[in-house]
Amino acid sequence: NYSLKQLQQIDAAHHLHPFTDHKELREAGSRIITRAEGPYIYDSEGNEILDGMAGLWCVNVGYGRNELAEAAYRQMKELPYYNSFFKCSTPTPVLLAKRLAELAPKSVNQVFFGSSGSEANDTALRLVRHYWALEGKPEKNRIISRRNAYHGSTVAGTSLGGMEPMHKQLGGAVPNIVHVMMPYAYELALPGESDHEFGLRAAKAVEDAIVEAGPEKVAAFIGEPIMGAGGVKIPPMSYWPEVERICRKYDVLLMLDEVITGYGRTGEWFAAQSFGIEPDTITTAKALTSGYQPLSALLVGDRIARTLVEKGGEFYHGYTYAGHPVACAVALANLDIIEREGLVDRVKNDTGPYFAQALRERIADHRLVGEVRSFGLMGAIEIVRDKATRERFEGEGRAAVVVRDHAIASGLMLRATGDTMILSPPLIWTRETIDLACDRIVKALDLAEKDLFG
Ligand code: PLP
């Protein structure tokens, strides 16, 4: 058994962390999470922390689900691994693909598996370009994305994404990807512009990019239905149907990245259903297994799948762990839990509306808060210096980190991205858990206010 100090020393000596300033990590030492149960995580010091982020937006059924451990154990004993290359398969990816086709919007019926959201987006990018090449239009290869989007950390994921600091470190992005404005009214709407009008204007930016490039050169548009890592940016309801109309008008494929929004977070199985659209591809991962196993599923539209079959020829692409039998067994058991416990419906009709109301009634009026917003069980709190003018604190992100640290010390794990506090809790949260989280947010905001204003 290692002490916290020992683990921190070994961590600092040997372990490089994702998205971490290693100089800061050295100075502060890592927080070591040792176990979890239901909605709570516990650190090595025995602190009980309510997990407002469901891990990294993934543990939708909460922690400590024996059923999922047992599904993995059973599958490992029977068949721990076999691949799905070269016309082979194993039973669990087959059954999972069928299940996903049943749950998804009717435009998508085929599934390509991987182990992460980044991998799935790499697949999606290659697949849509392959599709247009098979259709005899190899020059139709440009992808339109949005600034501030997050689509993963591989070279393709980073290139598709619109995060400037990530692009700066890339040393050369995948070519032929352009970025347009995001649909974020709080910062980008014009004075007097309604939400509806702003949504249409943000969609028009997609049309302008298509026209500028020439529709015969544009393969697809990709977007997160609700931007997650970029700060839970919820588009006006007018945005997605208009983007869909524009894509159809110019024969541009519509790709949704539902790595965060999939599997109940928005109150439907997929956010495509929340916004009433029928995409050509849907990237999913994370909550597909509630994070108990690494697994991603790219859902592929009939149009693309039909061309793959009709034209034939090999798609030179795949991962050793595509359709991993254990990960797929866990996913099936996870979907069983979500269905049996009615979690999707609960988000839509109970906890989602209650969460929105709680943020509005208990958080929005705080001096540090510029805006609260939520959709289903994902939410954001904008931290500002001045509510009326929306002026931010100096040093982007500094104030939000102060709030976050007080929140964690008060027993609530949430995330700060820029000046935005993010919440994306497990779908098992009840009204009582939401109340408890709000108590802790209010406490953190009060403490942060003292720090920031003296
Ligand atoms: N796409 C979106 C929208 C994401 O939020 C993420 C991860 O947070 C990814 C893709 C990448 O997924 P992964 O970290 O599993 O590679």
Image (spheres, grey):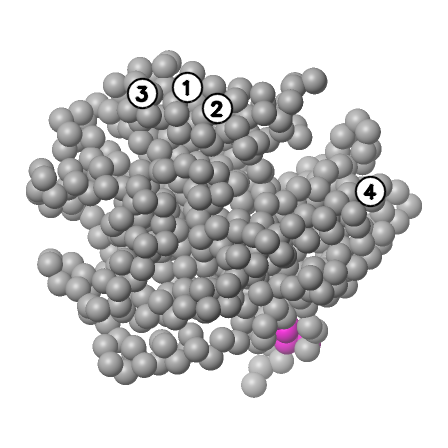
The answer to which quarter of the image holds residue 393 is: top right
Gap in angstroms between the C-alphas marked 1 and 2:
7 Å
Q: Which residue is mark 3?
A: 250
Type of the residue with mark 4: Asp
Q: Which residue is mark 2?
A: 203
The answer to which quarter of the image holds residue 138 is: top left
Secondary structure of the residue carrying tag 2 is helix
Q: Do callouts 3 and 1 mark residues in contact (Cβ within 8 Å)? A: yes
Residue 310 drawn above or below residue 194: below
Q: Report the predominant secondary structure element of the magenta stretch.
A: strand
**Start-end of magenta stretch:** 41-45
Gap in angstroms between the C-alphas marked 3 and 2:
14 Å
Q: Which residue is mark 1?
A: 207
Please tell me how crowded label 1 is: few (under 14), some (14-19), or many (20+) other residues with Cα within 10 Å.
many
Residue 29 drawn above or below residue 77: above
Q: Looking at the image, which is closer to me, 37 or 201?
A: 201
The answer to which quarter of the image holds residue 390 is: top right
Gap in angstroms between the C-alphas marked 4 and 3:
44 Å
Query: Residue at position x 58%, y 38% from top?
Result: 233
